[in-house]
Amino acid sequence: MNIGQAANHSGVSAKTIRYYESIGLIPEASRTESGYRRYGDKDVETLRFIHHSRNLGFSVKDVGMLLDLWRNQKRASADVKALALSHIAEVDRKIEELRKMRDTLTHLTQRCHGDDRPDCPILEELAGETIDA
């Protein structure tokens, strides 16, 4: 199948497939005599694996490690679990960052009168001016 068909079957855009090839995440596709990329079922399966991994927020680097583990029939599931647990810790860190952002924005919007006055604690905070808590 061509790159468009592989994209449709895998859920990964053609542009992203070319990117994954360029960084070595997937091997370069075979080519037809006229130079078009050709993909097989195994390639689509790999692209789906990558797509699912990326949707779970794994970095490209981590996806590469997951692919290596997936392809290695002698892998230890403990290695896979350790990678997943590390990713969970990163997700938890990001959630905490988002909570702090939300709390700050909530505090600022509660302090903003939202009327015709020009003073605005939201803009003052963005400008780096001190705001009383």
Image (cartoon, rainbow, N blue to C red):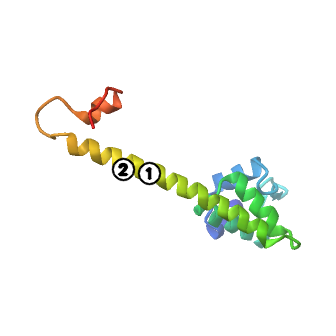
Residue shown at 76% from the left, 54% from the top: 25
Res 121 label:
none
Say which amino acid is labelled 2: Arg
Name the residue at the front extreme. 133
Q: Secondary structure at mark 1?
A: helix
Residue 44 visible in the snapshot: yes
Q: In the visual, does 97 lie left or right of 113?
A: right
CB within 8 Å, label 1 to label 2: yes
With respect to residue 17, does 116 lie above or below?
above
The local crowd at label 2, few if under 14, some if 14 to 19, many if 20 or more residues have their Cα within 10 Å, is few
Q: Secondary structure at mark 2?
A: helix
With respect to residue 54, does 130 lie above or below?
above
Residue of label 1: 98
- The quadrant of the picture occupied by the N terminus is bottom right
Residue shown at 29% from the left, 48% from the top: 106
Residue of label 2: 102
Question: Residue 77: x, y in percent?
Answer: 78, 72
Question: Residue 133: x, y in percent?
Answer: 27, 38
Of the pair 9 and 78, the residue shown nearer to us: 78
Question: Residue 24: x, y in percent?
Answer: 79, 51
Q: CA distance from mark 1 to mark 2?
A: 6 Å
Question: Residue 65: x, y in percent?
Answer: 77, 58
Residue shown at 75% from the left, 67% from the top: 80
Residue 1 visible in the snapshot: no
Residue shown at 65% from the left, 70% from the top: 9
Give residue 104's quadrant in the image: top left
Give residue 76's quadrant in the image: bottom right
Say which amino acid is labelled 1: Leu
